[in-house]
Amino acid sequence: MFRNKVPFLFLFAALHLLILKESSAQGPKYIKTIIVDAGHGGKDMGATGQYENSLRSKEKEITLAIALKLVEELKKQMPDVKIVPTRTTDIYQTPTEKAKIANEYRGDLFLCIHADSGPLKQGKRQIGERTVTRYKTTYTGKGKKRKKVRKPYEVTEPVYEYFKIPLTRSGTSVWIFAAHKTSDKLKAIMDGDENFEIETGGLDSTETTFDFRSPEGRTIAAIYAKRYQERSDRLATLVNEEVENTGRQALGVNQRQVGIWVLQATNMPAILIETGFINNPEDEIYINSEKGQQELAVAITKAVQRYKAQVESANNSGKPVIAAIDKNQPAASPEFEKRTVKDTKTIQVKNSQVKVDLYDDGEIDNDIVSVYFNKQQIVNKRSLTATAHSFTLTVEPGKYNELVLFADNLGSLPPNTALMVITDGTNRHEVRLSADLKNNASIQFELKNNN
């Protein structure tokens, strides 16, 4: 059903994105509302402790306990932020309902609490012996008088019991949605009510047949990879760091090839924290304990505070330095010459006149850049936004034509990133560049048909 809606959805999403980008560019960004989701609940128990001598934990109970502590810690440390739990009791909610709560409250962050598990191997051990009667078959006589004779005899055989072996892997991991699973982000904006397969592999998941190799698919994936995935990755990295600071095993930031549905259906940066392995003895004790639950709540809160400070620091940095294009600027400065070029893209153009539209790529975080063409400065300390800064280049045949991005700062979310949309009257290219205070990034132009 979704594939039949692609043209309409695609156009709607593109328009919606432009509106969102314009609104975000016009005003400062603040973290005002955070959604905290306790995974599973009600009839959906999630993972359970199944190894021998486990606590027989239920994931739904662990996630609720940690989520409630996280809600209280966030309220305590961030009193100016609205904290919204998706559930506070043992109730069942579909991923669609959870996402709807988050989107209706216009959340700025979505934090989903889960407990990890995995397939358990079966072991066996001898617990005793028993005597059993068996029979030996022989035959007497010949022809029609041939008879079968069964003689009983007793043997002793071992008695085994079977049990599930606990997992050896332990630790806390953080998950973000995969860029190729963007179709559900699109459905979230449309507020659809499609039915999805959920809880695949113990996570809120779904498959999609949408082709992300198509032109529409590549565009949608690129839009949401920048709009959500980078910010989700930033927050997830901070959570991983804070977990590591507790001395606990931190398993890093991960993307699942089978997308985590509830992350994709929320119209905001979203992460899922697998707090520990419910079928690992040490982890199960930790995530059931008051101490472990509170330690995780504090670690996640510290990460959110750091993320909030980074995002909002761009609002207090004063007016950006903006300079008009000046083709009479002097040649490259010594500071420009000192930096190496590590990010180089090559594109072919068919006309000597090339238009360049320069944007910030992803989060608008006060990135300031200068741009050089063939070592002549053509843009001086320009603050990048969602609004294009445009200029025209003349590409000369048979010569080395290079456009270089020079980072004048790192913005609030390093590194300095830019999107250049390049048109030569025939073709259109989208080029993403990344620079820092040690390395420049560049585009090399090859003129194939000089008109």
Image (cartoon, rainbow, N blue to C red):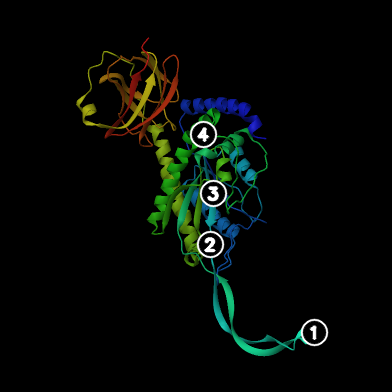
Q: Nearer the viewer, mark 2 or mark 1?
A: 1
The 10 Å Cα crowd at callout 1, few under 14, some 14 to 19, many 20 or more, is few
Residue 251 x/y as whole percent = 43, 54
Q: Nearer the viewer, mark 4 or mark 2?
A: 4
Please name whichever residue, 157 or 56, is drawn nearer the observer in this view of the structure. Answer: 157
Q: Callout 3, which amino acid?
A: Cys
Which disc, if any, is residue 112? 3
Q: Which residue is mark 2?
A: 278
Q: Nearer the viewer, mark 4 or mark 3?
A: 4
Asked if labels 3 and 1 touch by Cβ distance under 8 angstroms, the answer is no
Q: Nearer the viewer, mark 2 or mark 3?
A: 2
Please name whichever residue, 5 or 413, is drawn nearer the observer in this view of the structure. Answer: 5
Mark earlier in primary sequence (4, 2): 4
Mark earlier in primary sequence (1, 3): 3
Which disc, if any, is residue 221? 4
Which disc, if any, is residue 180? none
Q: Which residue is mark 1?
A: 144
Q: Callout 1, which amino acid?
A: Lys
